[in-house]
Every structure is written in structure tokens, then in C-alpha cells.
Amino acid sequence: MNCSMCLRSNPPWANACSACGAELASGDYQPPEWLMTPRGSEPPIFAMRRRRRRRQWWGLGLLLLICAGAAYGWYARSILTQPPMGPYSSDAGLASDWQPEAPIPSAGPESTPESETDGASESEPATGEGEPVGGESEPAGVAGAASGTKPKAGATGAKRPGKTLGAPSDGRAPGGKAPRDTAGAGATSVVTVSEPPPAGVDTKTWEKDGSVMVRVPGGSFQMGAKSGEAAEGPPHSVTLPTFWIDRNEVTNKQYKRFVDATNRPVPYVAEAWAAPHNWDRAARTYPEGQGDMPVVLVSWDDAAAYARWAGKRLPTEAEWEYAARGSKATAYPWGDEWDSARCNSLASDPFDETPAPVGSFPRGASWCGALDMAGNVWEWVADWFAADYYAASPASSPAGPATGRYRCMRGGSWGSPSELCRSYSRGFRPPYARSDAAGFRCAADD
């Protein structure tokens, strides 16, 4: 609406000129000339702007469509890669399994170790920080985890009074566990049981970490079982070449060599239940007197990094199971009958909430001379976990799925019932999980 007083253009709803204040008569509004022209005859600049805005809106819509498709694809993939329904499909306990790396005190400059994930898509930095943390439960997915946890003593870590049992005349605790030196408050020194390996077992000492390794002659065996969980079958024949495997689980003393050589962060979880096993992050040392204890509070990435540093590797699931049960495919390393005196498990002493020194149960040795392959601590192995992998597993040297969300664990722990200590039982956890019931041992080619 043009003001006749000052030729000022005003909006059609104005009653007075915004410039001079003159009263405007209704019906005086005159739209711009280009608005009254037929479509296509407006100035070229306006047509160009209209086409540009149209392209922008189409581009924005296409971008949103691509983003929505990518998000849906990621979600569908995460669902499809989950284990099938059953004991291995539950995510219960995963939140409590996840233990984020606690900040290291500024005791001096530390170099950040290079990534040790070997292409793992679920390494620690990739997981969301701030997830809840918690206790020392069994690996997610193993049967009986809820009922297979020893009674806990509370947040302070103090132990409940246990059973009083007479020690054998040879000085070992019942079941073959080495006696602990309880002199003084909090003392945890141990006496490691050392016995020669079974007759016919070849051994050698690995120079880099000082571990004793036993030779596992190549051969064939039945991997898996019909009577276990769905993911533990079907039983199938597997052939393996000769290899070597650590006789014992990696100890704190051996792991200390690794952290000193690589400046890797020491095992530590900022939770009350982990206090008895936490290393001193300033001094970078393990708890006093626990040098012969299996190292715990380590992730799969930590275990794989240690193995590479030592010039070894983590055993595959097939190698671990073959070393534990042999060509006879026994249910336990010592045979088919359960014997709680041959390993450190829930049945050995329900009130003992810690691992035993490595080699404390020589009567539980497997056919090749490997110790503690039932109970004591769960052991990380190289394979990704897939519940249906056995159905399509290669007959020779299977190495597990190419990718996955969880890494496999074997052997059961001090908090496991007998069914989880079977040589064919499979556990799994995210590769970043840390627990006071999980460690590892290494393998090497012949």
C-alpha cells in the first residue's frame, strides 16, 4: 500500500504510513508489478532463486532419507548379530561386566599404548562412557550364572568366616590349594605348589615372560557336546596341528614385566569389589604377596597385547578345548566325573572368594599337563563368539567368526558351579569387560 504523501510502500494491513504517519485509505495497496505478471515472465533473478530453493529442499530431504536408512541399517545389524534366544542371548549382567578405564593419577608422564584391538570393532574407546559398572559376575550368557556366584562379603571386601578344614600332611589346603600366609592383617603371600608334569609331557620355558609351556601334540577330537547348551553344539570333529600352551594362567608377576616394558595401564577397576585385586597405579605394582596369583581385571585387549609382547598369541577356542580334554573329549580336564578337589570352583569352598595361586591343583592337570583349565579364573581366548558357529565350523584349525560383538572365555572360575567348569562350556563377554574372575593364558605355534 503506497502512501501518497511520501510514496512509502506499506504492508496491506497497515492503517497509517510507517514513515510519515499519514492515514491510509483501504484499497490503496498496489502489489509489485512482478507479482501481477504471469508465471515465467518475472525477472530472471526470482526464477533462479526459486529453483535454487527447490534444489535445496530436495537435497535436504535426500540427506535425511540417507541418514534414516543408515540408522535403521545399523540397528538392524545390531539385532541380527545378537545370539539367538536362549541362555546365550541375554544381555543381563553386561552392564555390570563393563568396567571403564579409571583415570590414572598424575604420578608422571605416561605414553598412551597403541591400539591393541586387532581390528576389533568393540574396543574400549568405542563404547559409551558413563555406563553403569558393577561386580564380579560370571561371563554373560553362560548357564547358571545367577546361581553360580559365591556369597559376597559386602562392599568393603571383607570375607565371611569360612569353613574350618584340616590341612593334609603335605601342607596343602584341602583340594590341593596352596596354603596362604595369614600372618598380619591383609597379608596375602602364597606358597606355590610345584610338581613335575605328567610323564611324557614336553615342556619348555618361554624366555620373554618366563612362563612354562607344555607341548600339545596335534590330533583330532570331538569339539562341543550334545548335553550342553545350544551354543555348545553340535559336536563336530576338529583336527589341529601341534602347538604349545602355557601350563599355568599368566600371573601378576609375569604381567608386571609386560606393563614395565610397554607402559600399559595396570589392572584397576574403581569399585569396592575389585579392591583386593587392584594394582597400585602410582607405583605400578600388583598387591603385595600376589605375584603367583593369576592376573585379573584385564580386558581381552590387554590379554592380546600381552601375548603379542611375549611373542605368543591367545589360543583359539579349539586349541583351548583340545588342550583341556584331548582326543578322548572328556567332560573335565581329569576325566568325565566331577571332582571339586581338583580345581578352585564354587564347590571347592563356597566362602573363598578369590583365585588360587597358579598350579595349586596339580591333580586337576589335563592330559597334556596344563593346569587350572577348570575353575580358578575364566580365560580369554582368541575367537569372537557366535552361538551358531559350530554348525559351520571348519574341520581343520577353526579360528572362529571373522567379526562379532563378544569374545569367548573358557574354563569357569572360582565362582562357577561344576557345569560351567566343563571343558566344552562357553562363556562370552565384550572385549572391554574386566572382572576379578577372568584372566588368560597364551599359546604358540610349534
Image (spheres, rainbow, N blue to C red):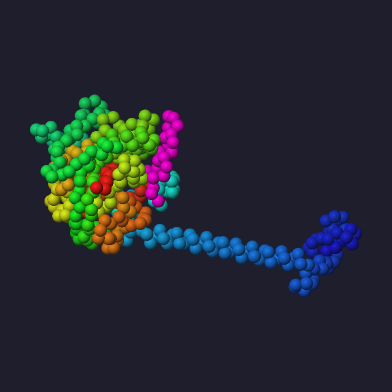
Q: Residue furthest right?
A: 5
Residue 98 visible in the picture: no
Percent position of residue 426, x then y:
26, 53
Q: Is residue 364 above or below residue 10?
A: above
Q: Nearer the viewer, residue 405 or 143?
A: 405
Judge whether residue 161 can be spotted in this image. Answer: yes
Residue at screen point 20% across, 48% down: 216
Q: Position of residue 435 (x, y in %)?
A: 31, 43
Camera-side residue: 200 or 182? 200
304 displayed left or right of 114: left
In the rendered image, residue 104 lying in the magenta stretch gets the answer yes
The image quadrant that residue 209 belongs to is top left
* Between 358 and 237, the one nearer to me in the picture: 237
Residue 434's place in the image compared with 31, above or below, is: above
Q: Quadrant of residue 400?
A: bottom left
Q: Which residues are magenta?
A: 96-119
Residue displayed at 33% across by 59% down:
83
Of 172 and 26, the residue lying toward us: 172
Tally the numbered discs.
Answer: 0
Residue sitting farthest toward the left: 169
Give percent across and percent down for residue 125.
Answer: 43, 46
- Residue 259: x and y, percent? 35, 36
Q: Quadrant of residue 187?
A: top left
Identify which residue is drawn at 90% across, 59% down: 5
| 260 drawn magenta | no
Identify the main secondary structure in magenta.
loop
